[in-house]
Structures are given as C-alpha cells and as structure tokens.
Image (cartoon, rainbow, N blue to C red):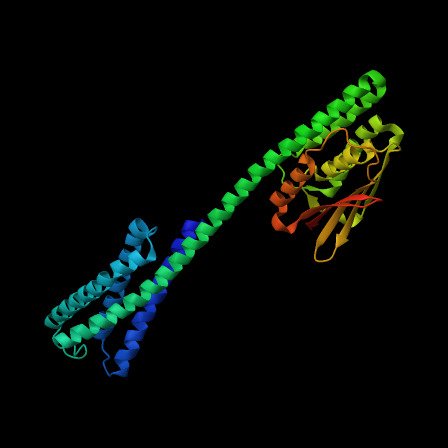
Amino acid sequence: MSTASAGANRYWWFQLAFWGGYWVLNLAFARAWGYASGLINVTFVCLSLAMLALTHGYHRIYVRRYRQQPIARIALQLLWLLPASALAIQIGLAAAIVLLFRVFPDRGEIGPGGSLGALIGYTMNTCIILIVWCLVYLLHAEWTKRRAAEREHWQNEIRLREVELQFLRSQVNSHFLFNALNNIRSLILEDAEAARRALTHLATLLRGLMNNESRVTVSLREETEWVKGYLALEALQFERRLTYELVIAPELLDAQLPPLLLQTLAENAIRHGIARRQAGGCVRIAATALPASRWRLEVVNPPADLPATHAGSGIGLNNARARLQAAFGDGALLELTLSREHVVAAAEMPL
C-alpha cells in the first residue's frame, strides 16, 4: 500500500470514529434528559453527517491551499470560519426540524424549544466540537509535515554523503594508481619479471576497485585481500627491506570499513616509515574487537631514521578521516600515535 493511500485510509477512519462517537454521545445525552424518539435519532444522524461533510470540506481546503501555510495563519482563518460554520449548521438543522414537524406533526418533541437562546447554545456546542476536530486534525497534519521535512533532510544528507564519498574515493584511487605506476616504471628497467608480477597485482587491485566503486563500505575480508596485493606491489620495489604481518581476528572479517582505508594507512606507513629507514622494517596490521560493538584497526610501523626528502601533504590521512566521517559520522575516529619504537595509525569504527 502506498503512503498516500495509507494516509487516506487513516483520515477516513479518523472521520468515521470521530463523528460516529459524536452521534453516540448526542444520543446518550438526549436519553439522559428524557428525549428519546425516532425523530431524535434521525436528527442526530443528519447532524453527524453534516459535520462530517463540513470537516471533509475543511480537509480539502487545507490540502489544496493551506498545507504549506504557517499554523498561525490557519488559526486566524479558523477564528471566523468555525463560528460561521457552526451557525450555518444549526440554522440548517433547525430549518430541517421545522420541515419535519410540518410533515410529521405527531412525532413528539425534538427537545427544548426553538428560541434564539437555544440556537446560540447549540451553535456554541457545535463550534466547540469543530474546534476539537480542528485541533486533532491540525496537530496530526503538522506532525506529518515535520516528519516529511525531517525525512527529506536526511535523504538530502545521504545524497550529499554519497557524492562526498564518490569524490574522496576518486582522490584515493588516482593517488594510489599514480604511486603504483611509478613503482612499476622503476622496476621495468631493473627487473622485467618483477614488473610483470607487479602489473598482475595492479590489475587485480583495479578490478576490485571498479567492482566496488559505488559501495560506501566493504568488508574487512575484501580490504585485507586488496592490501595483500598492494603490499606485494611494494615488496617488489623494497625487496628485503619490507616485510608485513596481518593479525586479524576471524570474527571481524565481515566488519565494514570504507574502501581502501586499510590500503591508505599501509601506504602511509611505508612512505613515511619503511622508505625512510636504511634497514627497512615490518608493517603490522591488526584488527581487534572492542566493547560496545566497536572494533579497532591498527597499522604499526617503525619510525623513520632518515630525513624526509620532501614534506608530505597529509592528503592520505586527511582523506581517510573524511571517508570515515562520511561513512560513520561521529561514530568513527582515526588517530596517529608516534613513539621512539613505533608509529601507530589506529581507526575505531562501529560494528
């Protein structure tokens, strides 16, 4: 069932329940005051139907002209519309009763006399009932509008986040591809066989990237396979100077993270750690579970002991933080910790 159709069903159930209850209440009060006859029943049925038709007219006017208007403006319109409507209903009802008495003079009394005071009293009662109906209707309509506005707001946020993720992914892909091609270019003259193996690893990585281009997150299992290919590419260039170790808790293999996040952290460890050490070193990748349905991804490398040949731009870590924010909002963080023994890039994310 569509949203519009469900809303129409709720509206009609509300109308029937409200005015059906109003009819039952009128009958109960009439019997309590000692007025009970077929004519009274018919009168109250006509009154309830007239009120239903009137409020349905209010509903149509609201939907066509006032749905987007401020509630204060609608209230100003109701200040004159409700009393006028109540008076019109009571005058019409009085005219119908007079006509019925002329056609059926022996049907008994309808109730207290038809004086001006009685007309004013009935009009005030009708106006109060209309006010109650309008309050219930408008409160529900305003709540529905706010829900629709909130839903639209979050849908726009999701669309914006998807655009941001696409942009950030394109930055990472181009950055990674540029570095990989540079490595392979260096290998071509030195070791043709190694260059061929590197191209095979690169083709595997690019195939995985293209297959997951539209995904906001991927599993740690997939990301681990990609980073193995990336590290194999880098190991061809660094030879014995680069080793790596993966310590992944099996229960975390299906945990989600932004595509290429692990590769970005591994690349950062190699470029700013292993590449700036005479003896090279080991890159350790670990994934551990944390309390409160969270998990931690760490990339650990030894610190550099050679001066940097050029200042880093920081694009890798900044991009990683932005992709974590876009995928998980404030539920994720990325920290870089430096000590004499190790440099630790750690990301925490929800499971």
Left or right of residue 22, residue 231 in this image: right
Instruction: Give the residue drawn at x 79%, y 20%.
Output: 186
Left or right of residue 256, residue 93 in this image: left
Q: Where is residue 267? Give x, y as percent.
A: 75, 34
Instruction: Give the residue drawn at x 34%, y 66%.
Output: 18
In this view, the residue in front, 63 or 277, is 277
**Residue at the outermost top position:** 189
**Residue at the outermost front position:** 307
Q: Is residue 15 above or below residue 175?
A: below
Left or right of residue 20, residue 88 in this image: left
Q: Where is residue 256? Give x, y as percent.
A: 69, 45
Q: Where is residue 6? Give x, y as percent.
A: 43, 53
Q: Quadrant of residue 206?
A: top right
Instruction: Give the residue drawn at x 30%, y 54%.
Output: 62
Q: Is residue 245 above or below residue 204?
A: below
Q: Where is residue 94? Give x, y as percent.
A: 15, 69
Q: Is residue 278 visible?
A: yes
Q: Is residue 203 visible?
A: no
In this view, the residue in front, 252 or 268, is 268
Q: How many marks?
A: 0
Q: Is residue 244 above or below residue 187?
A: below
In this view, the residue in front, 58 or 226, is 226
Instruction: Give the residue drawn at x 78%, y 22%.
Output: 184
